[in-house]
Amino acid sequence: MSARVPRTHPYIPNSAPDVRAAMLAAIGARGVEEFYADIPAALRLRRPLELPEPLRSEAELTAHLEELLARNTAVPPGRSFLGAGCYRHHVPAVVDEVVNRSEFLTAYAGEPYEDHGRFQALWEYQSLMAELLAVEVVNVPTYDGFQAAATALRMAGRATGRHRLVLVGEIDPDRLSRIHDYVRGVHELVPVPAEPAAVRAALADGDAAAVYAQLTDFSGRIDPELPDYIELAHAAGALAVVHANPLSLGVLAPPADLGADLTCGDLQPLGIHPSFGGGNAGFIGSPDEPRLVAEYPSRLFGLVPTEVPGEYGFGDVAYERTSFALREEGKEWVGTAAALHGIAAGVYLALMGPHGMREIGETVLATTAYARQRLAEVPGVDLADPGAVHFADFTLRYTGGRTAAEIAAALLERGLHGGTPAGEHEGRYCVTELHTRADIEHLATALEEIVK
């Protein structure tokens, strides 16, 4: 019997030094560090993880986790005024009922690859989402809206062969970080204010691949200049990539109707519960133009005729363009994504219908306007941008001397989540259809006690 190969990890067989060295030699790598070269230094932990001592039994583990969970605190939906990309909306019970069925309960787009039931569910999602976005093509969801934005910009770069990306207005810092990390080394980012003159100046050299703008920005402001940005992009030979909150499209014009080439965003508002680090999925939509469809790295499902007259199956469209077919030669790598959230969004859209989407959009728009008006009446509180129209998110400016961090902490002591600092004396809030006038009045009363 041959000697047992020494192992350095009980659950990773290929961690034995000789085996690892052979693997590195086979691919021509000098060390494991080469695999992490693309991860920015600021994101890397240069020390061992601070892990507790291992627990020796299931009972000990259960007790430990219960102790940790007992530290969590929660507030009712009407007492949470957090938003900025992840929102509390009503999720109809049937959405959870469908996505928790065993035949759907996986993040994969379809395993095995003959899973036509899941393919049909995602095709239905794509069809409903295409109607909402006023486009013809929608992808199987990406990991989240951040990834959708980054991928849409890479698509624009490949389609135009250009390298500069003009980013307009106030963008979620986390989304901007993802975009930067995903396009660095390939594209140059050019941030500009939300002003047509600034966009025009950034496009003057004629080398822009895309103008990236937002239907509603990080502060929830609806940008009235969006059609101008799209027109300027096209005049410069660039593509217009627009980020949108899909729930707003029942009341706001879809970016595609304004001329956008690619529309992207996060599906979370469409029947997906917010959660700790999850509950997100990204969408990208476009017209059915070959030069754009060819650049989608993710799967697209379409109708496929069968041998039975009048019956159809569901399968991949242009599968050969994906990394599933091309592997390391793919334009972008696509792996386990958020397909289950796509099914949730499809169920939600089917339940809501056009009239329901219009009603909820109008409700959020009106509730946001009322909340801004009522909270601005609090002494020591002003609107950060009083002339703008907002959807869900908005920012308040405090003039009473207390900082935004102090006010947010004082609200939390009163069982209210809100006022995320957006500056030393500015706090960001959000309302949805779940907030009543009584909820907003409760927040106003608390601010009257806190803001001095």
Image: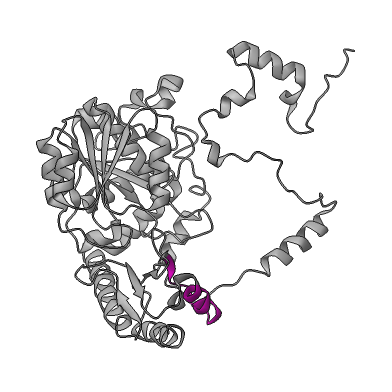
Magenta highlight on residue 414:
yes
Total tally of numbered discs in the picture: 0
Residue 284, given in percent of the width and then of the height, sits at 30, 43
**Residue 289 as seen in the image, left or right of residue 439:** left
Q: As displayed, is residue 345 above or below residue 150?
A: below
Residue 433, given in percent of the width and then of the height, sits at 33, 73
Tell me if I can see residue 257 in this picture: no
Tell me if I can see residue 175 in this picture: yes
Q: As displayed, is residue 182 above or below residue 451?
A: above
Q: As displayed, is residue 28 above or below residue 212?
A: above
Image quarter of the N terminus: top right
Camera-nearest residue between 286 and 45:
45
Magenta highlight on residue 331:
no
**Residue 42 as seen in the image, left or right of residue 177:** right
Residue occupying image coordinates x 39% and y 32%? 184
Residue occupying image coordinates x 27% and y 37%? 165
Camera-nearest residue between 311 and 129:
129
**Which range is magenta?**
406-421
Q: As displayed, is residue 64 above or below residue 257?
A: below
**Residue 271 as seen in the image, left or right of residue 101:** left
Residue occupying image coordinates x 18% and y 47%? 198
Residue 440, given in percent of the width and then of the height, sits at 37, 82
Image quarter of the C terminus: bottom left
Residue 138, given in percent of the width and then of the height, sits at 28, 42
Quadrant hosting residue 88: bottom left
Camera-nearest residue between 55 and 343:
55
